[in-house]
Amino acid sequence: MVFQFKAIAQTDDEQLKIIEKHIENIDFAGDYNELSDFIGKKNKEKLNINKVTPFQLYSLGFLSYNQINSIINHRKKYGDFVSLNELQTIDSLPEDIIKKLKLHLFLNETYEKFNILKSLNESEKNLSIFSKVTTPYSKGYIDKNIDSANKFLGTPFISRIKFKVDYNEKLMVGFNAEKDAGEEFFTGSNKKGYDFYSGYFFIRNTRKFESFAIGDFKADFGQGLVISGGLNTGKNALVTNIKKTNTGIRPYNSFNENDFLRGSAVTFCINKTRITFLISKNKNDATFDTINNSGSDMIFIKNIDPIGYHRTAKEIANKNSHSEFMTAQNLTYTLQNLNIGLTSLYRKSLYGNTPNDMLYNKYYFTSSQFYKVGLNWDYYYKNINFYGESAISNNKSAASICGVNISIGDFADISTIYRNYSKDFIVDYTNAFSENTKPMNERGLYSGILIFPSSKIQLSAFYDFYKMPWYTYFVDGTGMGNDGFFEAKYQADKTNLIYFRIRKKTELKNYNEGYFNSLKNEEKTYIRIHAEKEFSPVITAKFRIEISKIKPQTGVLSKGFLFFTDLSLKKAGNPLSINSRFTLFNSTDYSSGIYAMENDLLHTWSVPKFYDSGAKFYILLKVKFKKINVQYKYSYIKYYNKQTIGSGLSEINSNNVQENSLLLNYTIN
């Protein structure tokens, strides 16, 4: 997914806050490197002020629709800008916004003759080496009663290498390698070293084409109904930033072993039309079923592994056992304030999916090949933005999403989005706004509002009503629900703030009454108070209290509680920075657990869910000296109400766990 954000991230801490707002409502662990890279690239993006479109200005993330409209109208009325200082004559642009704009805008565009060897020589090169170990070791490493076919064959260390070359965002070359805990390293199934390798070669903004990729990459068009990759954050604390930004193709620079395309892609422009072609052939891990049909055996995919662990003999046997071919095309026509795009996709895999006799899977597409076509639009009219996409698949299933964003001066932003996804829509490669994990079997209406009563006060809220016409995993019948969110924030200055937040979600779930399931409402309520205070130019602290209440169909209330205090020490000009946190948590069970994002090493993200009863402490040290950045994190968690942690081969025979992580980052300018 492509992400929109409301403030430019100039520091690691500010970037962390933006990422947290995107992901804190997600009820699963994800790969957040792509989100971080996207936000980081937005800080470097340069746009020609005399050619920039409303869509490009919106993608910067900190301009209201009123401000975007004012910039475009000024250019129409007075002609091309002769100086960036001319922005000061636009009444809707305050001084702080103008300072941010000047970081992203330039006047004259020149195309230098592209020379790969020269670009590689003058580019910024960055190498990161990361390692992590968790102790005590889990059952899969030390239990001698486990047979050799099921135990972890490798060491308990995580090891990663990331190498990047970047020449002014025009030439980008990258290489990633990873070994997960439990996987073999330079032995056994990985005699050549790491278990996972990924790389890319990417060129953009040359005279001949807009972008060109070889290797591993991602693609995003429209609102994601035909093709979109990455993490789907859906509803989040950035209540009006739900529209997806079409970035086309981009290099893949993360460690998720399945969620990317592998092949080649190119985008070029003819007048006002942008044309993209891409082709991908990739392998993934799968398990299979064999079904006898009229005397002959037919092979079907039973399960696709989205994680990519290869620790045991069984997991190794499933590695890259299934392959699929995919090709997609996009044509986008731009006319002043209007974008219209047509996207098509065709996929053919080696096998189809196993027919599942569960009722909720009755309409899930199981064929080994399919195609989809989608039409998307994006139109600006003064302070209003209309956008959406409609798509249809070869099984005659359809999906549509329509949205409108309205800016009421500098006082408020309003966003509304309606989606209608058929129960049999093919969701492979899709990543659109939805309540479900994938956009199928759902109708809903979402509205969000962001209000600025003063420069220091911000009020935000959203309400979403949705319905699932067909059965789902937890609902034997027509499901429906509503989701409400409210936040009031007071920010005295850049570093001192306090906010109050409440979120309540109600939806129908199965209630077992013996012989059959009836449907009853399950209620989830989360209340948070969060404060940040800068005590001096060196010391900054954060405090949070959060309470969860889950009332399931049985009426038995499940409660959760979390408190943390976070301390950061950083002095300007000092190469050493320190961050530490102490967390107390208690919950009735897993369902009422609470997520809390933590500071972590570069290219690494930690968003644990705290449940049961216990305490956690971590300390993060960062030392930066010229071109070398060394980071170390130690964490310790102890549970008060249990003597073992985890289950299966990952079970740890202890009530406490320690983690040690180390990263070395070297940059050559």
Image (cartoon, helix red, strand yellow):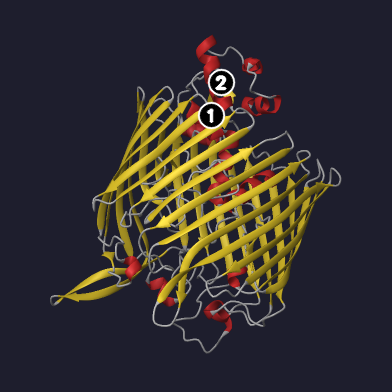
**Left or right of 389 in this view: 559:** right
3D distance between C-alphas at marks 2 and 1: 9 Å
Q: Amino acid at mark 1?
A: Leu
Closer-to-camera residue (83/596):
596
Residue 193 position in % (x across, y down): 49, 63
**Residue 365 in sight from this viewpoint:** yes
Name which quarter of the figure residue 627 lies in: top right
Q: Secondary structure at mark 2?
A: helix
Residue 389 position in % (x across, y down): 37, 40
Q: Amino acid at mark 2?
A: Ile
Q: Which labelled disc corresponds to residue 57?
A: 1
Residue 223 position in % (x across, y down): 42, 42
Q: Which labelled disc corresponds to residue 205?
A: none
Q: Secondary structure at mark 1?
A: helix
Mark 1, residues whose alpha carbon is within 10 Å: few (<14), some, or many (≥20)? many
Of all residues shown, which one is farthest toward the bottom?
145
Name which quarter of the figure residue 574 lies in: top right
**Left or right of 290 in this view: 569:** right
The residue located at (48%, 23%) in the rendering is: 112
**Left or right of 443 in this view: 126:** right
Closer-to-camera residue (283/410):
410
Closer-to-camera residue (382/346):
382
- Mark closest to the chain's N terminus, 2 or 1: 1
Q: Which labelled disc corresponds to residue 71?
A: 2
Asked if marks 2 and 1 touch (Cβ < 8 Å), the reply is yes
Of all residues shown, which one is farthest toward the top?
78
